[in-house]
Image (cartoon, grey):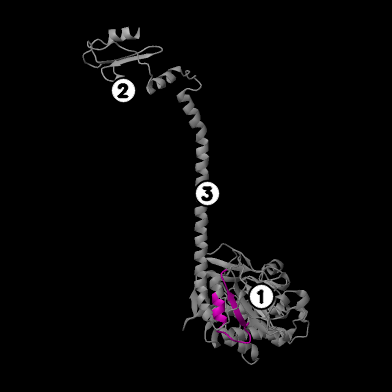
């Protein structure tokens, strides 16, 4: 049947093919036995003579194309559920959340890695800068000590050897190999001071030598540790006696006058007698240490500034210090000079006379600052009421009232009216030197932060043995 249909359909061609349900028949004027040729019969007609063709024979051996076509025809028809388009949609919709999750994980991981690398580079840059800043210290006159030596001296900074904590960081007692007792200040990560203050103190104290200044014995500057090694003073700081009622009784009038005179001599050395003209900028009771004979020694030069040549005052936008001790022109305008230290000395002198701290607790109790209260008693001629009751009647009234008068001269509002430290030393030493009447001191008020940058200002309100300086936004303003 296939041959008959093929001859009827292909009457004038040399090649032909026909597909039936279960067979395929093809003919050609060329040898097609064992030759795979599918494309040659994709067309229905090839022109040529067919009359001379030999009888058409059925191809007995199927080609590879035949097998493929047969398998394709015999395969079951796909159901609607497995339709190509539907299956593609299901597959793509199932893969989409996975791809999004993988992409999100990659993006988050890349971001975290970039942040880590950035922070690591920033830390390294800061450390390199700190090391570069500290490198010149190795050529200073002070010995550079190994960290292992300091760790051995302090019992690896044990809690038993901890003496207290200041603005720089914790202070530890240590014993060096030769048996020398030392006090070690360790820069804290939370410290308001940094490499600049550390370097400033090392370079400055190395050039200052006076019996009323604390002596720096060495330092340690590593990648992660910055340490200052001082002479050990067993009586610690002045505030540990002055503001502790149980210890203040040990400060009789002779010791108090000795401390006042010693602090004045130390400041005079900084301002006029040393090779450098130095402004301390943070004179207060906790920065005055006492040796075994209760001789005062000024410490903590991290905030100190050196004046060049004939320079007498400096205007800065970065105000540092402790509220209650800062001169008004410095707190408000950022102007500091030797007269700023004179003001701080006057406040400290009044604290030594009264045994009271010029801080928030005094304001709460008396409604005004210690300085304003002193001025009020002066104007009312009741100066003796200002003296510490623990002194009793055993102190010389004239000498105490003279010190009180000098203190009020030092805290006058106008810096030009304040005496120099050389005049202060003479006034304390000689009863014959006349004293001018003081003018009113400035008023302190808590109010808005001034426009200039206030960093870090401290306000001591604690009544503990060791004062703790807290950062506040409290400022000083004249009335």
SS at mark 3? helix
SS at mark 2? helix
SS at mark 1? helix
Q: Residues within 10 Å of mark 2 (few under 14, many from 20)?
A: few
Q: Who's the residue at 47% across and 28% down the image?
A: 88
* Alpha carbons under labels 2 and 3: distance apart: 55 Å
Does the magenta segment cover residue 158? no
* Alpha carbons under labels 3 and 1: distance apart: 50 Å
Residue positioned most to the bottom: 432
Taking 103 as reference, is 150 left or right? right
Q: Earlier in the sequence, mark 3 or mark 1?
A: 3
Q: Quadrant of the C terminus?
A: bottom right
Q: Who's the residue at 50% across and 39% down the image?
A: 100
Label number found at residue 286? 1
Q: Who's the residue at 51% across and 43% down the image?
A: 104
Q: Quadrant of residue 177?
A: bottom right
Label number found at residue 109? 3
Question: In the rendered view, would you say 126 is above or below 356?
Answer: above
Disc nearest the viewer among 1 and 2: 2
Q: Residues within 10 Å of mark 1 (few under 14, many from 20)?
A: many
Label number found at residue 92? none
Q: Quadrant of residue 235?
A: bottom right
Disc nearest the viewer among 2 and 3: 2
Residue span colored magenta: 199-223
Q: Foreground: 294 or 46?
A: 46
Residue positioned most to the left: 49
Q: Earlier in the sequence, mark 2 or mark 3?
A: 2
């Amino acid at each position: 049947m296939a041959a008959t249909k093929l001859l009827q359909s292909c009457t004038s061609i040399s090649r032909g093919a026909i597909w039936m349900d279960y067979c395929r028949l093809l003919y050609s004027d060329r040898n097609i036995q064992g030759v795979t040729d599918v494309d040659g019969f994709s067309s229905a007609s090839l022109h040529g003579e067919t009359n001379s063709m030999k009888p058409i024979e059925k191809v007995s051996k199927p080609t590879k194309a035949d097998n493929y076509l047969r398998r394709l025809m015999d395969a079951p028809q796909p159901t609607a559920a497995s339709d190509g388009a539907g299956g593609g949609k299901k597959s793509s919709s199932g893969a989409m959340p996975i791809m999004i999750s993988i992409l999100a994980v990659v993006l988050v991981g890349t971001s975290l890695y970039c942040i880590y690398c950035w922070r690591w580079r920033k830390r390294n840059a800061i450390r390199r800068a700190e090391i570069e800043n500290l490198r010149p210290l190795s050529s200073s006159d002070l010995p550079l000590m190994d960290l292992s030596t300091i760790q051995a001296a302090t019992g690896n900074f044990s809690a038993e050897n901890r003496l207290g904590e200041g603005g720089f960081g914790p202070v530890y007692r240590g014993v060096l190999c030769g048996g020398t007792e030392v006090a070690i200040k360790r820069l804290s990560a939370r410290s308001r001071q940094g490499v600049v203050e550390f370097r400033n103190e090392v370079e400055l104290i190395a050039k200052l030598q006076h019996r009323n200044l604390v002596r720096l014995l060495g330092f340690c500057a590593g990648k992660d540790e910055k340490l200052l090694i001082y002479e050990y003073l067993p009586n610690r700081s002045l505030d540990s006696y002055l503001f502790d009622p149980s210890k203040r009784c040990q400060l009789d009038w002779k010791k108090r006058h000795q401390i006042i005179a010693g602090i004045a001599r130390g400041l005079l050395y900084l301002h006029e007698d040393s090779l450098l003209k130095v402004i301390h900028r943070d004179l207060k009771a906790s920065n005055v240490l006492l040796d075994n004979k209760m001789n005062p020694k000024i410490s903590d030069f991290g905030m100190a500034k050196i004046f060049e040549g004939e320079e007498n005052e400096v205007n800065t936008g970065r105000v540092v210090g402790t509220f209650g001790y800062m001169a008004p022109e410095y707190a408000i305008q950022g102007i500091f000079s030797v007269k700023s230290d004179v003001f701080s000395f006057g406040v400290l002198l009044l604290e030594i006379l009264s045994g009271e701290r010029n801080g928030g607790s005094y304001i709460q109790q008396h409604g005004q600052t210690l300085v304003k209260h002193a001025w009020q008693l002066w104007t009312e001629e009741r100066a003796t009421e200002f003296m510490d009751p623990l002194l009793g009647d055993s102190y010389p009234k004239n000498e105490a009232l003279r010190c009180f008068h000098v203190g009020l001269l030092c805290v006058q509002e106008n810096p030009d009216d304040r005496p120099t430290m050389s005049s202060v030393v003479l006034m304390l030493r000689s009863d014959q030197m006349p004293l001018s009447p003081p003018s009113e001191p400035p008023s302190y008020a808590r109010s808005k932060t001034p426009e200039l940058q206030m960093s870090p200002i401290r306000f001591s309100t604690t009544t503990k043995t060791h004062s703790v300086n807290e950062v506040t936004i409290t400022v000083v303003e004249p009335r």
